Image: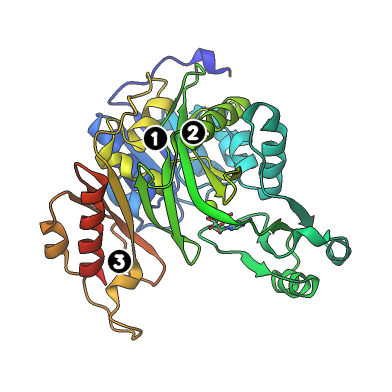
């Protein structure tokens, strides 16, 4: 079926989501506020998106009868989890409109395909990925060029939040790290001198129209996003334009439909390097819920429903702080207690989002807090207050 056969989907039709995490939950909230119904397919019955959805199918992502049931009730299906089998999205596409498409998601699921795609895009996008080499055997380790070290060994598939990554200085380090990954194919990436990190959130409709949100500056701690600040304090207008143009070119070349986020590194000499892309709403785009006319989740609804894309204008400077399970713990012990939400909620301009997860494990994303203010300096002051309360 070609995309042209589909007319816009309107409320109260049902939209489907593959995956039950917090991105699916916030998607459900946005879709429901526009009058759509939401169905979630996810293997675990108690999940953040399931708590919010109108209906839930508890099944594996590759369960064919479950996929058929989801496809039958939904006018369109999207994914909130990038490691959903691409074959499942292809199967759903025989029944209903699927955005993003299986082939786009499969590129983003594989760091190697993703890097090759970025290289292919470079003549038009103007940005290259970090120098890298595939490590699939011990012979590959012997053939590592000297200038790729020190580097980071990353598993080609299933990595996120810094998981599946080891920093390496020597060939012996690479050999040890590769052996510890149990022989899965990896990518060795040169360690680059980062000045700061940014991401560009985009959305593209089935008609090829695209929008680009303001550039976001991201700070990571232990491989996990810590804060997103928009406008970014280090980002020059020239850098923002380059990154936004590159992102627009990349989504067009991918033929993508839906919300997509592209992470970039800005090096100390000002070079822009494309890192990776997420074929879904992204943690660094959560600020859009409280600080933009159209949130990234409402935008996903619009793209998959073939509705006109929404206004991406930001109306307030904003800082998003991830709330990890760590803040439930006092010190390094095992005792947990609820953070002081009363104090957090008393901060003017603090928008609290909790994902309904029961168990506050360390390093687990439990929620986020967006601090909006008339100026970035005021948002920073609120961030300091929030951190003092949560620490
Ligand atoms: P993940 O899928 O876990 O987000 P990334 O490739 O984005 O994986 O890596 C996580 C973080 O590690 C990045 O945001 C960046 O801070 C750091 N990092 C990754 N690759 C490099 C690199 N080549 N040079 C320097 N830092 C890097
Ligand atoms: Mg990343």
Between the C-alphas of marks 2 and 3, the distance is: 44 Å
**Residue corresponding to mark 2:** 238
Sequence order check, earlier mark of 2 and 3: 2
Between the C-alphas of marks 1 and 2, the distance is: 13 Å
Q: Position of residue 59 (x, y in %)?
A: 47, 51
- The disc at residue 358 is 3
- The disc at residue 48 is none
Q: Nearer the viewer, mark 1 or mark 2?
A: 2
The quarter of the displayed image where residue 291 is located: top left
Mark 1 within 8 Å of ligand 2, using the beta carbon: no
Mark 3 within 8 Å of ligand 1, using the beta carbon: no
Residue sitting at 76 percent across and 59 percent down?
148
Sequence order check, earlier mark of 1 and 2: 1
The quarter of the displayed image where residue 47 is located: bottom left
| Residue 109 showing in the rendered view | yes
The residue most toward the bottom is 333
- Of 297 and 97, the residue lying toward us: 297
Left or right of 343 in this view: 1 = right
| Residue 136 showing in the rendered view | no
Between the C-alphas of marks 3 and 1, the distance is: 34 Å
Sequence order check, earlier mark of 3 and 1: 1
Residue sitting at 66 percent across and 62 percent down?
152
**Contact (Cβ within 8 Å) of mark 3 with mark 1:** no
**Residue corresponding to mark 1:** 214
Left or right of 294 in this view: 282 = right
Secondary structure type for disc 3: loop
């Amino acid at each position: 079926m070609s995309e042209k056969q589909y007319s816009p989907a309107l409320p109260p039709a049902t939209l489907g989501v593959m995956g039950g995490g917090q991105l699916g939950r916030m998607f459900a909230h946005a879709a429901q506020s526009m009058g759509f119904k939401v169905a979630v397919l996810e293997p675990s019955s108690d999940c953040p998106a399931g708590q919010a959805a109108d209906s839930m199918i508890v099944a594996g992502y590759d369960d064919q009868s479950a996929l058929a049931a989801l496809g039958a009730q939904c006018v369109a299906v999207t994914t909130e989890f990038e490691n959903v089998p691409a074959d499942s999205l292809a199967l759903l596409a025989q029944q209903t409109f699927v955005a993003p498409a299986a082939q786009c998601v499969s590129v983003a699921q594989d760091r190697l395909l993703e890097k090759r795609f970025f290289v292919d895009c470079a003549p038009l996008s103007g940005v290259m990925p970090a120098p890298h080499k595939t490590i699939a055997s011990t012979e590959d380790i012997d053939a590592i060029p000297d200038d790729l070290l020190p580097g980071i060994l990353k598993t080609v598939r299933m990595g996120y939040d810094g998981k599946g990554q080891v920093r390496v200085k020597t060939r012996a380090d690479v050999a040890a790290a590769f052996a510890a990954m149990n022989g899965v194919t990896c990518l060795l990436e040169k360690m680059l001198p980062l000045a700061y990190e940014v991401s560009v959130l985009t959305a593209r409709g089935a008609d090829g129209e695209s929008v680009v949100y303001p550039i976001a500056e991201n700070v990571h701690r232990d491989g996990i996003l810590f804060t997103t600040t928009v406008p970014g304090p280090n980002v020059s207008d020239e850098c923002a334009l380059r990154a936004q143009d590159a992102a627009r070119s990349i989504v067009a070349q991918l033929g993508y439909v839906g919300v997509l986020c592209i992470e970039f590194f800005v090096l100390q000499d000002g070079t822009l390097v494309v890192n990776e892309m997420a074929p879904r709403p992204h943690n660094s785009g959560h600020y859009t819920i409280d600080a933009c006319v159209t949130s990234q989740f409402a935008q996903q609804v619009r793209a998959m429903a073939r509705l006109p894309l929404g206004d991406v204008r930001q109306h307030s400077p904003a800082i998003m702080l991830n709330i990890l399970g760590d803040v439930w713990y006092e010190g390094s012990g095992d005792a947990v207690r609820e953070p002081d939400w009363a104090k957090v909620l008393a901060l003017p301009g603090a928008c609290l989002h909790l994902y309904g997860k029961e168990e506050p494990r360390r390093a687990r994303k439990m929620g986020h807090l967006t601090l909006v203010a008339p100026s970035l300096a005021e948002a920073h002051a609120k961030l300091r207050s929030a951190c003092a309360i949560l620490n």
